[in-house]
Amino acid sequence: MQKLQVQGVHHITLTGVDRQSSIDFWEGVLGMPFVFDQPNLDNPNEGHLYFDPGDGRLITIFTDETRKGTPERTPTEPGCVHHIAFNISQVMFWQVVDRLDQRGIKHSGPRDRGFMDSIYFKDPLGLLIELASYRFEPPQGSTHAQVLMRAHQIRVRRGDHHIDRLHVADAICELVEETQPSLSTDRSSRNPYA
């Protein structure tokens, strides 16, 4: 028996209400370009809107002009989506509170996650949205996931509770040393000021 191998998220499809409300939130609040629109090929009574969240992948919304929504929190039972997190830059992250406040959108305020910063709020239909911003850039040739995996290994070796800044910084140092060659035979930390 062989496993299947995925290579990233292709798209996420959500059930929305009317077309304009979907455009107003996904493009008008979150800034995702509305890239195409067609009927839902499995249900002729619904539209299917496509938005680019910024990485060329897709968030799609099934719309129905007769469907009504509620701002109550979406279900979080097993098998349900708890929340969707979108990546934003640090410069944008520190503008989020003001920009949500200007619209009267309730939010969590900044949350310190050690290796990233997060802010949470609900979309108009009760889906929890997280805006997340990494506090680091991975070294050339590495991904955020590779840095976090290494940070996890460092955290476990040290017996620490959760990944924090120090684990990420040490993970980056280890990855650079492993993946980027040097003419030096000794790459250990030294003090040139001694």
Image (cartoon, rainbow, N blue to C red):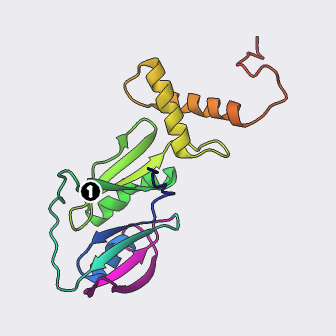
Residue sticking out furthest to the front: 1
User: Toward which corner of the image does residue 67 lie, by quadrant?
Assistant: bottom left
Q: Is residue 107 left or right of residue 133?
A: left
- Residue assigned mark 1: 81
- Decide whether residue 130 is among the magenta residues: no
* Lateral position of residue 139 relative to residue 186, left or right: left
Residue 41 sits inside the magenta stretch: yes
Q: Residue at x 51, y 57 (%)?
A: 7
Q: Which residues are magenta?
A: 28-54
Amino acid at circle 1: Val
Q: What x and y, as percent, mark residue 121?
A: 28, 56
Q: Nearer the viewer, residue 97 or 66?
A: 66
- What is the x, y in percent for residue 69? 16, 73
Residue appearing at x 44%, y 24% in the figure: 156
* The one of 163 and 88 positioned closer to us in this rendering: 163
Q: Is residue 46 above or below residue 152?
A: below
Q: Secondary structure at mark 1?
A: loop
Q: Residue at x 57, y 46 (%)?
A: 143
Residue under the image location 57 percent in, 31 percent down:
171
| Residue 80, position as x, y percentages in the image | 23, 56
Q: Is residue 47 above or below residue 186?
A: below
Total number of numbered discs in the rendering: 1
Residue extending furthest right?
183
For label 1, the crowd category at 10 Å Cα-Cα, with few meaning under 14, some 14 to 19 and many 20 or more, is few
Q: Which quadrant: the C terminus?
A: top right
What percent of the width, then of the height, locates residue 184? 83, 25
Would you say 184 lies left or right of 98 here? right
